Amino acid sequence: TEGYVIREPSVSYGDDHLIDLSKIDFEKLAEKFKSGRKRTINERLKGAVAQKLIAMVRLNRARMDYLEQFQAMIDAYNAGSLNAEEFFEQLLAFAQSLNAEERRGVGERLNEEELALFDILTKPQIEMSDTDREKVKSTARELLVTLKAEKLVLDWRKRQQARAEVRVTIEKLLDQGLPRVYTPELFEQKTTAVFQHVFDAYYGAGQSVYAAA
């Protein structure tokens, strides 16, 4: 996330409310904007969106496109291409899209950890049947359970043998579970991407970015 100007704290937009994107009253905030200090409200809402977005990207790197979209919005505002009202409307719409993204896992019947793996395995979009999508979900679930139970031991990232065992386990379970739409080239790409995700997100002995979330 380096290079993105989004390190601002979540602060209040009224006497009694904090800008919590999951609980925000969009109509009330819009009314506050009309009668209040527009620039101040924009900065506060931008800070709340930034805080939420950083946390969401940390859990799922497939959300980087949201980060890029947010930065483009900020750049346009800073350059004068958007006035205060236009920026506010775009921020509100973007905040609502983040709320929808945060709920996406519920619709897929996946938790945050499973959704991150599922996104790695299916994005950019791969044409597949609903049955194949369910196979990918099952594979993601099984892989996580197996890795956490057997392979992600204390300091596994520091030991070559432990890293190799994690890589082999990923290859084996993906080979067994992924549908035939995955070509050998695509399979190799996804295996590497999954291993990198596991290396970055799981520290071993139950510690991970998800445990801290």
Image: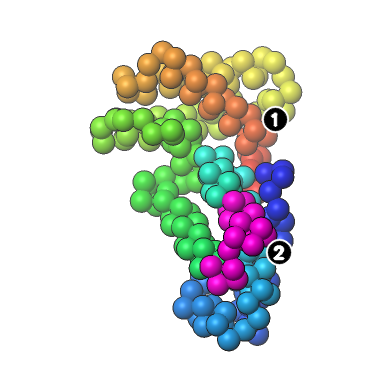
Residue 77 position within the rendered picture, expressed as x and y whole percent measured from the top left: 63, 61
Residue 65 position within the rendered picture, expressed as x and y whole percent measured from the top left: 53, 44
Q: In which quarter of the image is the N terminus?
A: top right
Q: In this view, does 144 lie above or below 75?
A: above
Mark 1 crowd level (few <14, some 14–19, many ≥20, 10 Å Cα): some
Asked whether 209 or 165 is in front, the reply is: 209
Asked whether 95 or 86 is in front, the reply is: 86
Amino acid found under the numbered disc labelled 1:
Leu
Asked if marks 2 and 1 touch (Cβ < 8 Å), the reply is no
The mark total stands at: 2
On residue 154, which mark appears?
1
Give the main secondary structure, helix, strand or loop, of the magenta stretch: helix
Mark 2 crowd level (few <14, some 14–19, many ≥20, 10 Å Cα): some
| Residue beneath the point at 36% across and 51% down | 107
Q: In this view, does 38 lie to the left or right of 107?
A: right
Q: Can residue 179 be seen?
A: yes
Q: Give the range drawn in magenta.
A: 70-86
| Residue beneath the point at 55% across and 21% down | 192
Q: Report how far apart the C-alphas of labels 2 and 1 lie in the structure.
A: 34 Å
Q: Which of marks 2 and 1 is nearer the N terminus?
A: 2
Q: In this view, does 50 lie to the left or right of 177?
A: right
**Circle 2 is placed at which residue position?**
9
The question of residue 74 being in magenta is answered with yes
The question of residue 155 being in magenta is answered with no
Asked whether 151 or 109 is in front, the reply is: 109
| Residue beneath the point at 66% across and 40% down | 207
For label 2, the SS is loop
* Residue 118 position by quadrant: top left
